[in-house]
Structures are given as structure tokens and as C-alpha cells.
Amino acid sequence: MTTASGLSSAETVDLFKRYVIPNYNRYPVNLVRGEGSHVWDSEGNRYLDLFPGWGCNLLGHCPQPLVEAVQEQVATLIHAPNTWHMDLQGRWAQMLSERSFDGQAFFCNSGAEANEAAIKLARLHTPKEKYKIITFEGGFHGRTLAAVTATAQPKYHEGLGPLVAGFQYAPFADLEAVKGLADDETCAVLVEPVQGEGGIRVAPAAFLQGLRELCDERGMLLMFDEVQAGFGRTGEWFAYQNFGVTPDVMTLAKALCGGIAGAAMLTTREIAPSLRPGMHAATFGGNPIAARAGIAAIEMIESEGLLENARRIGDLFRERLSSLEERISLIREVRVLGLMVGVELTVPGAPVVEGCLKRKLLINCTQGNVIRLLPAMNLAPEQVDEGCEILAQALEEAT
């Protein structure tokens, strides 16, 4: 099978070398089609994809209900500016609000944009002298300048200084460190309840509960970055629902529209008016296609019982990978919450990723030695078995 242009993978790689800025490390494969948890390259090879769309394709590739909804919407209204009302955007906001903490939504296009909105909101909502935001080592909040400053990983800061003022970093899950940093100039704490790029690290519930209490005591906003963990990924609609801690602000993206670009910042009705007209915007935010896709994604998750399936599949991954941990010495730890799966290794993970690619399995490595899986909610049990068996072969090869 080839693309409409008829280019092979090798020809496509050459095209990129000539015309595309090389800011990504790409695999030498031209993907042309996806269905469920499989993708095909231009040579007709089929791959099992356990990291679909970098976490965006939570419903698998090209889920039929979403495809049909988007196809219909493209023929009706593609884009309208946010100076007008669009019933789809209002309905989408309502559906997100009803499944979270009864707040209001600001729509944008990416996780970085959602976090930029949250950062602005935190400063706008609190007195002018409050501008500092505490974030956490190992966290990741996006690539725009404020979002990358919020990302407490020096490797992302190289060559970009001076960075945005006001961000302070604490070790992840260290409540005492946060208490030591918080002062009269601190307006917010921004945290991932489950660090994704940081290596699938789940925050202890007591830590998040402590942050909630501290923020309440000091008049600071508690902001959860759920760009990767939110929207059903953990087996609950939103990750915070696993911990019994409700944030003041929550950011969402990646899986929110089933693979269509779309993101949102949700906040309480009390705080929302602080993002007043003229202070922030997103030209394409909440556009009819994204809104229609977002609505279709919610409806598909509920009609097909996918939250329950996410929990079942997560348990199955934990069972299979814990079994591998017992017999493969390279595995240091297995971390699973729903469909966020991390396998920390004692060696670099890149050769394991390459070994899986050779065997037609797509996975990811983050932090150098953590194999990361973000599979689709409708993954079948036999696909879990297939993926874990291939991963085992690649790990044994790397031993």
C-alpha cells in the first residue's frame, strides 16, 4: 500500500530531509493508515500501536463514531470566530462540566496553550503582588516559553534564557518542600497528578490532599495539568477523581477530541470571570470540528463502556508486566494507573523501542529508561498479550 502521492518510506524520509525542519527525531517509517490499535506504513506493514498518537488517540485510530461526526461537520461549518456563539462549543463545555466539577471552559488547541491560559488565569485572579507558581521536578507542561519554564527539567531550557520569571521548583510529591517555597508572592501550584513524560509517576493521594489544604490556607490556586492523564485515561473521567482532591483549575488536551486537535482549561465558576475579555484568546479554540469531535468522543466512551474497559485493560497490563518483572532482570519497577503504563528499566530503553519496532510494535521511551505505553481504551485483551510478548522478546534481546 502507498500513499496518495505514491511515496515509499525511504522517499518520504528524503522529502523530509529536504523540506521539513529536523526538530524531531523520527523513525524511518511513513505511516499512511490507522484503524483501532493498528497502523500501516507505505509498504503495507502492519504495526500494533501501544502509543497511538503520543496519547492523543485514546479511542484508537479513526474511531468510526468520531469519523462520521467530523465528516458531517466538515460539510456543515468548518470554522467560525469566537466573536460568535456556536451551540456545539456550548454543548461541549456543558458535557465536560457535568463530568468534572461543574465549572466553565476555555477552549484552545494544545496542552501548552491550555497551560498558558492557566498560568495567566492564576496571575489575573490573585492580587498583583502574587505572581509566583510552584511546579515539580520531572513535570512537563509544554513547549511555549511560559509552559517550558514551568517544566522543571533543565534539558528543555537550554539556549532559551532568560526564562519567564516567577516559577519555583519542588521535588515531586514533597509537600514540605512546597511549604518551604510558598510565600506571600505565590499565586498557584501547578502539578500533574500523574507525571507522564516524567515516567508515569503517580502522586500519592496524601500529597495532593496536602496541596489542597495548603492552597486553601494561603489563598493559592491548585492547578492540575491533566493534559496526558485526563479524559478517561486513568479509568475515571479525570485523574483527580482517583484521589479525592478537586483542583481549582484543570488543563486538558491530547485525547480530548479523539485525535483531532483540541484542548481546554476548566475552572470553577468563581474563578472563571478573572479571564476577562481581551486578556486571552485562541483563534481556532473550540472550533466546530474540534467541538463535534469532543462531543463524539464523550458519547463513544459512555456508549461503549470504555471507562470500565480502561480499568480492566490497565489491570491486565499490570498482571502481565509484573510477571515479566519477576523473570527479566532489566525491569526495575512497573507503574500502572488505568492506561498509563510505565516500565522502568535498569538500562537505556532506546534499544528496546528499536527491538519492538523491528517486531512491528510501537511503544515509547521517556526519561531515558522508562518504557511508556498509552494504549487505546478499546484495546482487546489479546492485543495486551501480543504487545507484552513482543516487549518481553525485545527486553530479553537487550539483556
Image (spheres, rainbow, N blue to C red):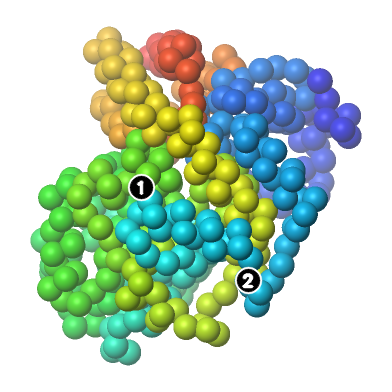
**Residue 238 — which label?**
1
Asked whether the viewer can see residue 248, the reply is yes
**Badge 1 vs badge 2, beta-carbon distance below 8 Å:** no
Which quarter of the image is occupied by the C terminus? top left
Label 1 and label 2: CA atoms lie apart by 27 Å
* Residue 87 x/y as whole percent: 61, 63
Residue appearing at x 35%, y 72% in the figure: 269
Using the image, tell me which numbered label, if any, was put on residue 306: none
Residue placed at 53% from the left, 56% from the top? 92
Q: Badge 2: few (under 14), some or many (20 or more) residues near its Cα, within 10 Å?
A: few
Residue lying furthest bottom in this view? Answer: 128
Percent coordinates x, y for residue 252 in the rendering: 45, 54
Residue at the spot 19% in from the left edge and 83% down from the top edge: 184
Residue at 58% of width from left, 61% of height from top? Answer: 89
Q: Nearer the viewer, residue 70 or 381?
A: 70
Q: Does residue 341 show up?
A: no
Please, what is the three-letter code of the amino acid marked with disc 1? Phe
- What is the number of callouts on the image? 2
Please state which amino acid type lies under the numbered disc 2: His
Q: Which residue is mark 2?
A: 85
| SS at mark 1 in the image | loop
Q: Position of residue 390 (x, y in %)?
A: 48, 13
Residue furthest out toward the right: 5
In this rendering, the answer to whether 385 lies above or below 369 is: above
Observer-nearest of 108 and 159: 108
Q: Secondary structure at mark 2?
A: loop
